[in-house]
Image: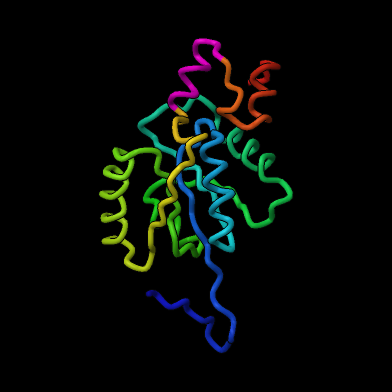
Amino acid sequence: MKKMSLAKGSNKRMKRIALFPGSFDPITCGHTEIVQRGLAIFDEVFIGIGVNTTKTPTFPTGKKVQWISEIFQGEARVKVGIFSGLTVNFALSIEATFILRGLRAAPDFEYEKNIELLNKHLAPNIDTVYLVSSSTTGHISSSLVREVLRFNGNLKGLVPDIILQEISQQKI
């Protein structure tokens, strides 16, 4: 079992910071569930919005930051920021020693396992922690939400209410 590090010259343990990286295009109820459950494990969960220059996002990065900030307002242990480049480099820059990932089904694990192994090679002191989605959110993905949105389907229960309200009021 891994021992918790103690801050030098102190009896206090180091803060457990987890980076939850993703495109969050948009953030879904599945994402928010993972963050909430992550708060039971970590002192701080930093939601990192990755910018992928090879993809065109549906929602502007600034809008994603706004949504996430509003969803978690009042929860000081949730931070949000934007990054590009390697996830582990961003994790190191915010002093995260964990990467938090959600798993919906077995194919997610196969995909995530290879990323974890590469991340471990690049940054051996960063561990990946997986949380399995609940049965109520395991079917939700940002790509499926975008598809429902594209065809004017009902997004209730798929995205947080703030996003649902903006979409229904056509603010986006």
Q: Which colour scheme is used?
A: rainbow
Judge by depth and name the residue closer to the eye, 70 or 108: 108
Residue 152 magenta-highlighted: yes
- Quadrant where the image shows the N terminus: bottom left
Say above or below: 171 vs 71. above
Residue 44 inside the magenta-drawn segment: no
Counting from the top left corner in percent of width and height, residue 55 is at 39, 29
Furthest-front residue in view?
A: 135
**Looking at this rendering, what residue extends furthest in the right direction?**
74
Residue at (70, 17) in percent of width and height:
169
Depth check: give the residue in front, 143 or 139: 139
- Vertical comparison of 139 with 39: above or below: above
Placement of the C terminus among the 4 image quadrants: top right
- Whether residue 111 sits left or right of residue 45 in the image: it is left
Rendering coords of residue 39 (x, y %): 58, 56
Indicate whether 101 appears above or below 159: below
Instruction: Tell me where the magenta segment starts and ends, as one range.
Output: 143-153
Q: Is residue 138 left or right of residue 108?
A: right
Q: How many labels does the image show?
A: 0
Query: In which image quadrant can residue 144 be found?
Result: top left
| Residue 65, horizontal then vertical, whole percent | 60, 39
Q: Which residue appears at 26% of the width and 56% of the height?
A: 117
What percent of the width, then of the height, locates residue 152? 55, 11
Magenta region's main secondary structure? helix
Identity of the residue furthest to the top in this view: 151
In percent of the image, x 50 and y 58: which residue is there?
18
